[in-house]
Amino acid sequence: MIVADNDSADQASLAEALARFPGAKLVREPKRGAAHARNAAIAAARGAVFAFIDADCVADSNWLSEGCKSLDKADLSGGEVTVTVADERRPSAVEAFEKVFAFQQRDYVARKKFSVTANLFATREAVEAVGPFTHGVSEDVDFCRRAATLGFRLAFNARSIIGHPARRDWSELVRKWDRLVTERWNGFGGRGPVSRLKWAALAIATALSAAPHLFRVLTTRRLSRLSDRIAAAGVLLRIRWWRARRMVAALLAG
């Protein structure tokens, strides 16, 4: 096991965690960013299989074995991600929203052709051929799509499960989407008139996309109480409009 420390502030907790796993190897990467941290860990790894997971995630007991097994039929494998909250009986509005919409791994793999790196397995052959993760863009999307271009196959694995904590409040949700919008803009195809027009159309579509998703959030089985569904619907409307405004701001600034 390799732990990449990306210039974390809480070194005491890091030391405590490492003490529980004497065989773990620590690598330090002072350049901030998930791509830099993952690349540092890759450089230190010697195994035939790479299993990526985030520091705030909790792996199921069969996560590693099932993930490795999934590579018998694929070159990259995205495992299931369940969204966890602090109190299932009383999720915040943002937590309720995240339980419905965050980390749709099956859809990501099948329709969008990528897996989040919070739960990604890959063969050494694929990782070495694709090359390092790219900082400044959505590194998981970029990495998986580069792999597909080279002919490597990505599959979804429902049996390799991790729990990922939901964002708890509006400020955490905004920080997440500010990063994602910036990364998407950085990776968007050029800055010419056609590309800028496409981006503007995407911003409009983002603002309007809340409407068709309202039925989903109000009928979901992931939330048991009507009050939680209504709260999640409110966050849905608010964040889609916020994202659209942020996209327009990026267009005007760049």
Image (cartoon, helix red, strand yellow):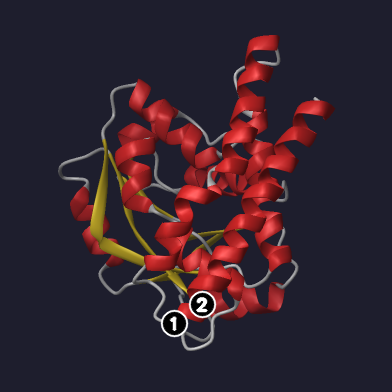
Which residue type does callout 1 highlight? Arg
Tags 1 and 2 touching, CB below 8 Å = yes
Residue drawn at (53%, 66%), measured in percent from left and top? 97
Residue drawn at (74%, 42%), measured in percent from left and top? 245
Residue drawn at (60%, 18%), measured in percent from left and top? 189
Q: Is residue 209 left or right of residue 191?
A: left
**Residue 166 placement: quadrant:** bottom right
Q: Is residue 234 above or below residue 248?
A: below
Q: Residues within 10 Å of mark 1 (few under 14, many from 20)?
A: few
Residue located farthest toward the right when viewing the structure as drawn: 253
Query: How far is mark 1 from mark 2, CA to CA?
Result: 5 Å
Q: Is residue 180 above or below residue 137?
A: below
Instruction: State the quadrant of the C terminus.
Output: top right
SS at mark 1 in the image: loop
Q: Residues within 10 Å of mark 2 (few under 14, many from 20)?
A: many
Residue underneath mark 1: 225
In depth, the one of 196 and 180 nearer the eye is 196
Residue 228 numbered tag: 2
Residue drawn at (36%, 21%), measured in percent from left and top? 149
In depth, the one of 197 and 230 nearer the eye is 230
Which residue type does callout 2 highlight? Asp
In depth, the one of 193 and 238 nearer the eye is 238
- The reply to whether residue 6 is visible in this rendering is no
